[in-house]
Image (tube, rainbow, N blue to C red):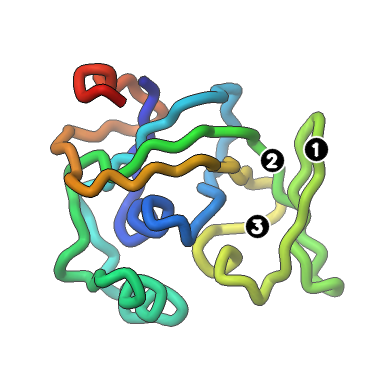
Amino acid sequence: MKAITILQPWATLIAIGEKKYETRGWATKHRGPLAIHAGKKVDRNACELEPFKSTLAKHGYTANNLPTGAVVAVAELKECFEVKRDVLGGMVLLESETRKTHFNIFDNEFHFGWYDSGRFAWELADVRHLPDPIPAKGQQGIWNWEGDKYGL
């Protein structure tokens, strides 16, 4: 199974269903299952800012209890969109070869990603939060993880 390492709190925001897009500076052609691996670092400053703090708290998390160095969820990578910002209209426009979508810059989703024009938003769907994170060593980029060993 393919996997991606994401810093905390962003990995957990995906796992708990509060973050639908992972933003990156590069596109991917991969579609299908993707393990969400929480890296070893926690951005403690981000955890204290809104809407991070209240969103995490709603699910029982703080900077002190976020899992690290483990796969925390499995999702389906549905699409890779290029980010187009419409600052005057207050919208983030996402465009792929086959679809267009958008959301308001006041949505939490905007605060949970880096939506500068020219970046990419990976659409994640059917996220399954793993109640017991599975320890794993992360890597940069998309990497192979032995999720089948765990029945995932």
Disc 3 is placed on an element classified as loop
Q: Quadrant of the N terminus?
A: top left
Q: Quadrant of the C terminus?
A: top left
Q: Indicate the amino acid at tag 1.
A: Arg
Which numbered dot is residue 22?
none
> Mark 1 sits on what residue?
99
Asked whether the beta carbons under mark 1 and mark 2 sit within 8 Å of each other, the answer is yes
> Mark 3 sits on what residue?
116
Q: Is residue 44 left or right of residue 126?
A: left
Disc 1 is placed on an element classified as loop
Q: CA distance from mark 1 to mark 3?
A: 19 Å
Disc 2 is placed on an element classified as strand
Task: Residue at 76% x, 36% y: name it.
Answer: 96
Q: Which percent across, then down, holds residue 82?
A: 71, 42
Q: Against 60, is 18 above or below?
A: above
Q: CA distance from mark 3 to mark 2?
A: 12 Å
Label 1 or label 3, whichever comes before in sequence order: 1
> Mark 2 sits on what residue?
81
Task: Residue at 57% x, 64% y: name it.
Answer: 109
Q: CA distance from mark 1 to mark 2?
A: 8 Å
